Amino acid sequence: MSSENTIKKFNEHVMQSYGRYPLVMEQGSGRRCKDEDGREYIDFGSGIGTNSLGYCDEKWADAVCAQVRTLQHNSNYYYTAVQAEFAERLCAVSGYSKVFFGNSGAEANECAIKVARKYSFDKYGKGRHNIITLVNSFHGRTIATLSATGQDVFHNYFFPFVEGFINVEANNIADLKAKLDDTVCAVMIEYVQGEGGVNKLDKDFVDAIYELCAPKDILVIADEIQTGVGRTGKFLAGEHYGKKADITTLAKGIAGGLPMGACLVNEKLEGVLTAGTHGSTFGGNPVACAGGLAVLDRIESEGFLDSVSAKAEHFRERLEKCSEVAEVSGLGLMIGITLKSKKAADVAKAALGKGLLVLTAKEKVRLLPPLTIEVSEIDAGLDLLFEILEE
Ligand SMILES: *Cc1c(COP(=O)(O)O)cnc(C)c1O
């Protein structure tokens, strides 16, 4: 089928909730993919940080296919070895006590919100349900996670939103202090705000959150849906800050491109969710868990995370030499590029014409390449990007 026909059929039948580029992706291999018209692209977006091992990685595909042919799904009324194995490995590598599996980032955050509120309710009773989230944060598209998201543009149309979220300005310790009263059960942060524009939180601010919350038994929730699973060169971005949240949520790259979300909790919270208080039909699906195990195998392999950091450094060095680049933000292979005169949206569009996929976040060009990208591929992609930026 030609891409024109696909786009026509698609738009006739799929709700128009996305602004899409006129490109029909057909096939991928490694860090490159091809559209229906046969054009090839170097991928600096990895499906928004999701295809962490690139396209159709062989070991990952073998593990996923083997699981599909063995047991593709079972209800959570029963146990599976593959979910047990993935949970054990994920807890070990992240340093958490227990995990709940859902199928997306928003679901992982829903679980985190429920755990925080129930922990507080069980221990302190009603009235301590508020959760502080940051201005410019992004936590998902369900009604509760939209309510948590600290951006007014998302608080439209779908009224009424969920009560109990209070916004604090990122990096403003005075604002945090003023709002951390005895109605608050948790503070929820992204160490690097992704959708909000690839902005890293200041170390002082993160230190203050942990210092102020601990004595009041206020939980810290780290939304590491975009920053986690090796994206920043550590398994969790919190490691760069020397911090471990009470709850960490993961999704995006966790299963190499299969739908999976995880809510990890520490010892203090491991018993909060009791039988019947939370659930998900597909949560911890065996195929997704098999994909997740293949991702962990790679990320935990000798030198892998160091190579992510080295490649990130290479990206930054080259980007900072480009005359059109004003600033490079982010952490590891989560890269935000502020441009001097060009518009990020125009650059992303022009990149398609050159055979390069990039993302945007607010006014920045955003790069979330597969963690397996090679230096030669980084260079080839940056050459294309610089043709656009320097023309
Ligand atoms: C993508 C993202 C989400 C939402 O994840 P979905 O899988 O789209 O529900 C939540 N928080 C952060 C930080 C994200 O980057």
Image (tube, rainbow, N blue to C red):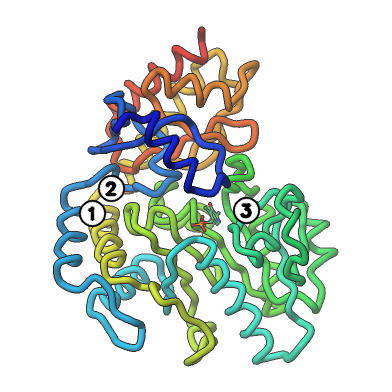
Q: Decide: marks 1, 3 in contact (CB < 8 A)?
A: no
Residue type at mark 2 is Phe
Q: In this view, does 130 lie above or below 196?
A: below
Quadrant assignment, res 208: bottom right
In the displayed orientation, state which residue is furthest to the top: 391
Q: Is residue 267 left or right of residue 36?
A: right
| Residue 210 in sight | no
Give, as a three-letter code, the residue at label 3: Phe
Dot 1 falls on a residue whose secondary structure is loop
Specify the quadrant that holds the N terminus. top left
Do we see residue 63 in this rendering? yes
Rounded to the nearest whole Å, what is the CA distance between mark 1 and mark 3?
A: 31 Å
Residue drawn at x 70%, y 62% as measured from the top left: 147
Give the total number of marks visible in the rendering.
Answer: 3
Type of residue at label 1? Ser
Residue at mark 2 to residue at mark 1: CA–CA distance: 6 Å
3 vs 2, front mark: 3
* Residue 191 picture location, percent across and down: 58, 53
On the image, the x and y values in percent for residue 2 come to 32, 29
Q: Is residue 221 left or right of residue 204?
A: left
> Residue at (70%, 76%) from the top-left corner?
185
Mark seen at residue 138? 3
Q: Earlier in the sequence, mark 1 or mark 3?
A: 3
On the image, numbered disc 1 is attached to which residue? 301
Mark 2 and mark 1 residues within 8 Å of each other at the beta carbon: yes
Q: Is mark 3 within 8 Å of ligand 1?
A: yes
- The residue at the point 52 percent across, 86 percent down is 273
Residue indicated by mark 2: 304
Residue 194 appears left or right of 124: left
Distance in Å between CA atoms under marks 3 and 2: 28 Å
**Label 2 secondary element:** helix
